Amino acid sequence: MNRLIQDCWQIIHQSNIKPQHSLYLPLENLKTIIEHFHLQPLPSRPMDHKLPIVSLEKPAFFQLSHEKLACLRLMIYQSHPHSSQVYEWAEKLIRFIEINYAIFKKRILGQWKPVHHAQLLCLHASSFLLDYTILNRDLRGLNSVLKLMDLKWIYQKKDLCSVLETGTHSALFQLRLLLVSEYIIDCMHFDVRGLS
């Protein structure tokens, strides 16, 4: 098992972090992934989230908000009948990242300030794209996220354990990206259709 995953998960269990009691849902719906890596489960609770009332019309990267991303992710988790909106948003985000990758930081920080706000939205959007990848087996979502994970202002793999000790949403989303991306890559070695 990936040593970093094991070390990070130990920090989660040794701390008083309450990752599941958050609008952002940084560690929501990870049961299959936790089992895949043979990790100790988080304290369970029923998933009783109601979809936030937000407009999902006109998908665009700079129209993102945590409420919209939480709504889109819950639509995936709850097999919501309006999944075409999930597809439309994922397509727009993937396309935006591909087209703007070379100038991504400049574009993002020109629109969203301060840096920690921009980082958190990028992490949340990446979490949505990984959930979308698992749902639709569309590896373009994983590819986009792996590119964003190469940007040190978004994802700090080298310092993830120390970042995780802060218990911030940013740290928890970074852990989610590590877990879910590694899970998808592991499953790819066997069969892309094996993603569940």
Image (cartoon, rainbow, N blue to C red):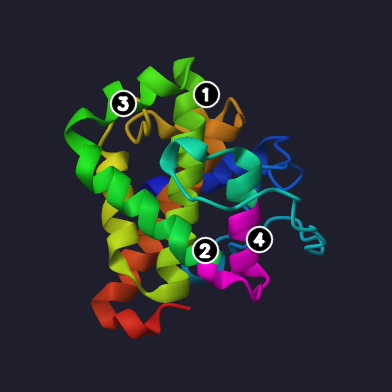
Q: Which stretch did the figure color magenta? A: 71-84
CA distance separating discs 4 and 1: 22 Å
Can the viewer see residue 152 in this picture? no
Q: Pointer 1: residues within 10 angstroms few (<14), some, or many (20+)?
A: few
**Considering the numbered disc 4 on the image, is that residue within a helix, a strand or a loop?**
helix
Q: Which residue is mark 4?
A: 74
Q: Earlier in the sequence, mark 2 or mark 1?
A: 2
Q: Is residue 5 above or below residue 106?
A: below
On the image, the x and y values in percent for residue 46 come to: 82, 64
- CB of mark 4 within 8 Å of CB of mark 1? no
Who's the residue at 69% across and 56% down the image? 42
Verify CB contact (< 8 Å) between mark 4 and mark 2.
Answer: no
State the SS at label 1: helix
Quick check: 3 left or right of 78?
Answer: left
Distance from Cα at disc 2 to Cα at disc 1 = 23 Å
Amino acid of disc 1: His
- Marks 3 and 4, how far apart at CA: 28 Å
* Residue assigned mark 3: 107
Which amino acid type is shown beneath numbered disc 3? Answer: Arg
Q: Residues within 10 Å of mark 3 (few under 14, many from 20)?
A: few
The residue under label 2 is: 86
The reply to whether discs 2 and 1 touch (Cβ–Cβ < 8 Å) is: no
